Image: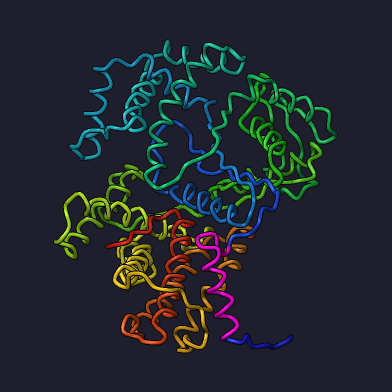
Amino acid sequence: FLNFVVDPAALTRATLDDICSKGSSYGHMPPSGIRVNVEHTSTNPTGPIHVGRARNPIIGDTLARCLKRCGHEVTTEYYVNDVGKQVVVLTWGVENATPEEVAAEVEEHARTIGRNEKERDKTDHRLVANYRVANKKMEAEPAVKDEISSMLRGFEAGDRTVIDTVRHTAEIMLDGLRETLSAINVELDRYTWESGYIADGSARDVVERLKKTKYAGTTEDGACFVELKEFGVQGKNTKFTFTRSDGTTLYTTRDLAYHLDKFTRADRLIDVLGEDQKLGSKQLCCALEILGCDRMPEPLFYAFVSLPEGKMSTRKGVVVYLDDLIDEAVARAYAEISKRRSDISEERKMEIARIIGIGAIRYNIVRVQPEKQLVFKWEDALNFDGNSGPYLQYVHARACSMLRRAGDFERDTDPSKLTDEYEIKLVKVLSRYESVLKAAGNDKKVHLMPAYGHDLASAFNQFYAGESILNAKESRNAKLTLVECAKTVLADVLDCLGMGAPEEM
């Protein structure tokens, strides 16, 4: 080991000059030329996003933001599962359920769960009633079951009318899902349809290629599989089935075609997946190796979000949606802002509440390592003084307030005017930003970003509390320069976390 000590004066000068020169791009790396594909969310278009899977879009979006700052060409992608029984059942319900049947289902469901409020006026929520109607009819009426089975067969056979009808329904559902994602500041670059790999023949091509390998086999009923024992898969999961007994493809087959397609468009693939997908991901990589792939997708697994007992828990077995969490966060933030700020309009209170509420959700979810269990607690998420999103946002607003009160000043990075221990500590935290971005992005350790943000906010507060900044004489401009640099970096951290950076709170 080699021990060395950095000269505080040299570090201060170099760090502050760099931030003043680069502004909001401080810490960002030059273009790498590496294309990175981050697939996240990809929830089935058959209902709203469940709160348990809220980690997926937030982790995926945060990772993409970090990777962009690492200089990579990043594409975020949503794989739309518009193939399969659930989405076909939904489509039948949208096409055939009468308004009276849907209204009756909504009322019955409200009685069942003990809630009197109407279905949320959002397409992904409204269509759930159509799905429930179709599901009940399918169980009760053989003719409906036959119609749905016929649609499924037509889909697999490439019937363009069926494919277009199902995709239209999925698009309607996606409108609602996109609205939810947009509310938490998540926008995706690309939506890729599973049905496309049936229509263009690439799923069938995967089948033919796998059949020709030495690992291929057939079950007694005619289903095709590849044997994965040689690849370390154990027990009953060694057979990776890629066709049904009637020869039709499975989700796994189309997922192989999808990943082969993605590898033609990117140098590095990252799949954000729930912990329940570990086996499927392992089998996918084994099958890709059998197909001759020399690169593999990198899974980023997360444990599901749970809620404590209370208003936001699953009541009478009814799921809690991400939309519910968003509404609750904004309402709680609004109540807190109303207590603190009687001097601003209701409209402005709501505007700030939305910024704080969404930030609270995103920060609280991404601050815990993805593979660790997360119980979402409001006392943690909306703690203005703790390890939370509102704390970072409050510190940013505090820095903005000081700069407003200071007015114009001449930047000064003279280290001889910044020698206090809290000034040097803040500079040291600022100097770490690029290394944190590298680890958060390149190594997929997104939880490091909120941890760094908290360190930065805490270091700023220590500096702020221990200094008479505006009344300083010779060192005033240097101290204000440090405030400005801290604000600049903190604003970029907040943006990297997908959070707003309010200038007042």
x, y (%) of residue 389?
38, 62
User: Considering only vertical position in the picture, is 304 above or below 389?
Assistant: above
Image quarter (top left, top right, bottom left or bottom right) of the N terminus: bottom right
Q: Between residues 414 and 211, which one lies in front from this camera angle?
A: 414
Magenta span includes 93: no
Which residue occupies 85% across, 34% down? 214
Q: Which residue is depicted at the point 42% across and 80% down?
A: 479
Give the number of callouts: 0
**For residue 235, side relative to residue 69 (left or right):** right
Task: Report whether 93 appears left or right of 116.
Answer: right
Residue 429 location (% of width, % of height): 51, 75
When asked about the image quadrant of residue 444, the answer is bottom right
Q: Residue furthest left?
A: 342
Say if 1 sits above or below 411 in the image.
below
Is residue 26 found inside the magenta-colored segment of the image? Answer: yes
Name the one closer to the observer, 264 or 429: 429
Residue pictured at 31% horizontal, 84% vertical: 471
The foreground one among 7 and 118 is: 7
Name the spot of residue 420 as percent of width and height, x first: 45, 89
Front-most of residues 254 and 421? 421
Which residue is at a point 79% across and 39% down the rendered structure image? 290
Relative to 455, say whether 158 is above or below.
above
Name the main secondary structure of what is drawn in magenta: helix
- Placement of 387 over or under 254, stated as above or below: below
Where, quadrant-wise, is the C terminus in this rendering?
Answer: bottom left
Q: Tell me the colour scheme of the image.
A: rainbow
Provide residue 281's location: percent of width, then percent of height.
64, 45
- Magenta range: 9-27
Question: Of all residues shown, which one is farthest toward the right?
Answer: 214
